[in-house]
Amino acid sequence: MTKSRLQELLNKCDESIPMSEEDKDWDQMLPIGKEWGSGEDLNALEEKIDIELARIIEERKDQPEIEVNIEDL
């Protein structure tokens, strides 16, 4: 794609339209492939994962524990 073509597409974007749930999920997805190549990038990814895990734990800490049957997963 040429630079001018990219600019044409960007010009057509209407940022006032809310993102769909699918687009939000895609936009917030953690990288899983070679887009993270350097050690610094991997450290940043681990930090993001730690922050997200801490958020989930905090969010769920007052909820009752549930039993999970591994065969149901």
Image (cartoon, rainbow, N blue to C red):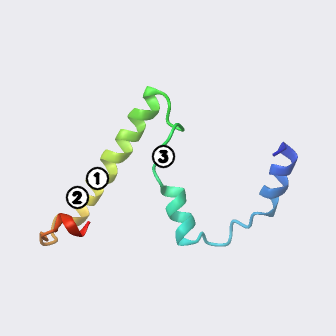
Tell how many labels.
3
Q: Nearer the viewer, mark 3 or mark 1?
A: 3
Q: Are marks 2 and 3 in contact (CB under 8 Å)?
A: no
Local secondary structure at mark 1: helix
What residue is pinned by disc 2? 57
The residue positioned 38% from the left and 45% from the top of the image is: 48
Q: Residue 32 at what x, y percent from top left?
A: 46, 45
Mark 2 residue crowding within 10 angstroms, few (<14) / some (14–19) / many (20+): few
Q: Are marks 2 and 1 in contact (CB under 8 Å)?
A: yes
Residue 12: image quadrant is bottom right
- Under mark 1, the amino acid is Leu
Q: Residue 14 at what x, y percent from top left?
A: 73, 67
Residue 58: image quadrant is bottom left
What residue is pinned by disc 3? 31
Q: Say which mark, if any, is on residue 8.
A: none
Mark 1 residue crowding within 10 angstroms, few (<14) / some (14–19) / many (20+): few
Cα gap from disc 2 to disc 1, whole angstroms: 6 Å
Q: Is residue 73 left or right of residue 65?
A: right
Cα gap from disc 2 to disc 3, whole angstroms: 22 Å
The residue positioned 12% from the left and 70% from the top of the image is: 67
Residue 39: image quadrant is top left
Local secondary structure at mark 3: loop
- Under mark 2, the amino acid is Ile
Local secondary structure at mark 2: helix
Of the image marks 2 and 3, the number of the one nearer the N terminus: 3
- Under mark 3, the amino acid is Pro
Q: Residue 29 at what x, y percent from top left?
A: 48, 54
What residue is pinned by disc 1? 53
Looking at the image, the residue that sits furthest to the top is 39
